Amino acid sequence: MSVLVVGLSHKSAPVAILEQAAVSGDTLAKLLRDVALTDPVAETFVVSTCNRIEVYADVDRFHAGVTAICELLARHCGVQARDLTAHLYVHYEDRAVAHLLTVACGLDSVVVGEGQILGQVRSALKLAEQHGTGDHHRHHDDDGGMSDHCNSQISHACDNRKGA
């Protein structure tokens, strides 16, 4: 399994697209469920703020994962796939993890270094756990799941940031 992120942010999309693509509440829960139910995905969480929507997933097949997530994002956001895909970015394996850490530490924010995004990422991980989409892999091997690794990496990065 490998970590994949498919998303759009203030750096890749105009405000009008970001506003259309924002998901919350029931729509976010449905997106989480539907992504988790796709064949290539073992677990997933979604970071959705006013400046980004990113779907993180532990996948066993890159292309199938990207295709499924792009289609589901378009469906749940109510944005035509052709309009959405022009603004999406994809990161895989180490680059996906590095991107998550960059986001969580506020280095990819509109205001660099802002701290609100860290709470939003942690909330996204907790929401995934509450909906059962963040810990599927954990029950199948001794290595822990994506959410265990992400929580650990985020906590470590943020502890180091507080000391800076």
Image (cartoon, rainbow, N blue to C red):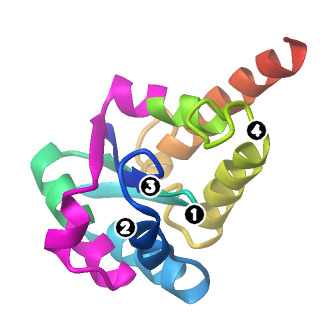
- The amino acid marked with disc number 2 is Ala
The residue that mark 4 highlights is 114
- Per the image, the residue denoted by label 3 is 54
Residue 38 seen in render: yes
Q: For the image shown, how many numbered marks are present on the structure?
A: 4
Task: Tell me the distance, in whole angstroms, between the alpha carbons under discs 2 and 4.
Answer: 30 Å
Q: Mark 2 and mark 4 in contact? Answer it, CB < 8 Å.
A: no
For the C terminus, the quadrant is: top right
Residue 79 is situated, as x and y percent measured from the top left of the image, at 29, 80
Q: Which residues are magenta?
A: 70-98
Q: Label 4 amino acid? A: Glu
Q: Nearer the viewer, residue 115 or 65?
A: 115
Residue 156 in picture, x, y percent from top left: 72, 22
N-term-proximal mark, 2 vs 4 = 2
Going by the image, does 64 lie left or right of 2? left
In the rendered image, the quadrant that contains the N terminus is top left
